Amino acid sequence: MSFREWPITDVFYVNLSLYLDAPAYLQQVSQWEEREARLHLLEDRLSYLRLQLRNAHAELNAMKEEAEKSKRRQEMPPWTATERLALLPAQAILSEKDRELLRLRATISALEAELCDMERLQGEYKHQLERQQDEALREKEKELLQLREALECEKQQVLQEVQSTLLQERKKWEAEARAALQMQREALLEKDRRMQADLRVALEEERKTALALRDETANLHARIQELESQARLFQAEKRVAVEELREQLQKEKEQALRHLRDDLEQERVQDMERMRAKLQEAEEQQGILRAEERKSGAEWAERSLAMEVASMARQLQDLLPRKAGRLSFSQGPHRSPAVFSSGHTLRAVREICQDTQRYLQELRHEAEMQKHEILPVQKEKGCYPHLRSSCARQLNGTSFSSQGSFSTQKLLRLLQGQIRELRAEKAGYHGGSPDHLSVFREDLANTDTEAK
């Protein structure tokens, strides 16, 4: 047991109360507190006096500076009467400042003296306080030594009491432990006897239970055999029921498949009908598109034919002399042949053929006239060579006219062949009008015959 765990007796409390309630101690404590309070007051007073002393020194320095300034002013050259009158208030103020300076010096000296007294008193109080504190500490140490000795004695007494108490408690505990062990041993023996009796009873019950279980096991074996026979019967019935159920399901499956096939056939027929309708609609649209395509092809062929015929007509017009009539192809300087219709183009070609026939007739007539003029001259004597040369020139002109006629016939044949091809293409696109083609063929045949 440690010192802190020892029990504190009444003697300790009595000694402690005597020590704490001593009047001398309380008086010393009150004196220390009063002295500390006075010391704090003196320190506050001392700091205040030091502050006043610093302020007084500052004022004294300022006054000294002003006095020096006034003294320097007095040492300056003599003043005039006006300046002296102006300086009278300043001199009065200066004298007042001097008197105030003297008062401040007296105050400073008094404050310095008071400060010295305060510092001396503070030192005395500090010294006295330290001395009293040392005395109190020494007295307290003595009292603590006495208290320690008393506590040591008390400790020894407590130790002895504790040891004796422990010995008594130990003996008491050992006696109680022996009594408890004896009681526990007797209880265990009694419990063992009861357990053995219970065990014998339990063994007897187990034997009876085993006999009953043996009889019950025989009954259960018989019941199991009976249940197995019933299970075999149930299995046979189950197989029969499963076969019947399988046949019924097969029939239902076949019936469902037939219904499904019928539904699929109906859906297929409906899909075929829809596809036929869509196909018919697509064919109709394709027929419309083909008709539009044929129409556009016919229009294109007709425009191509008109352009070819107009081009050939212009070539024929260029071969004709300028005195021949110009057709409607050249009525506008910027007019395109594609703007003419097939009827207009046929009329223009017919007019060109007529102009060509007239021109050929004129050429034949002129050739006949020249021939009739040349024949009498050829019958005369060949004494006029210039007549021969003129005849040769006329013959050359005639041959030139025949060549022009030949080229015109060739162009007409080419024009006739191209017109046939274009008309055949147009008839292939939209089956052109037979009457219109027959009229055009007759016009070309007549033109060819007249050209020959």
Image (spheres, rainbow, N blue to C red):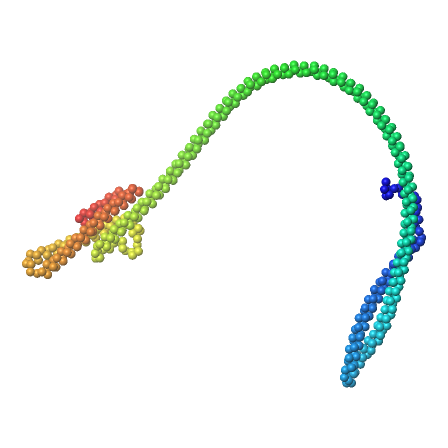
**Residue 293 in the image, given as x and y percentages of width and height:** 34, 43
**Quadrant where the image shows the N terminus:** top right
Residue occupying the far left of the picture? 381
> Can residue 421 be seen from the camera position used here?
yes
Picture layout, residue 106 above or below residue 293: below
Left or right of 135 in this view: 268: left
At 90% from the left edge and 60% from the top edge, which residue is drawn?
128
At 21% from the left edge and 57% from the top edge, which residue is drawn?
323
Picture layout, residue 287 above or below residue 244: below
Q: Nearer the viewer, residue 190 or 255?
A: 190
Q: Nearer the viewer, residue 94 or 261?
A: 94
**Residue 133 in the image, given as x and y percentages of width and height:** 89, 56
At 55% from the left edge and 18% from the top edge, which residue is drawn?
240
**Residue 75 in the image, given as x and y percentages of width and height:** 78, 82
**Residue 72 in the image, given as x and y percentages of width and height:** 77, 79
At 77% from the left edge and 84% from the top edge, which residue is drawn?
78
The quadrant where residue 213 appears:
top right
Left or right of 241 in this view: 87: right
Q: Nearer the viewer, residue 133 or 282?
A: 133
Left or right of 431 in this view: 208: right
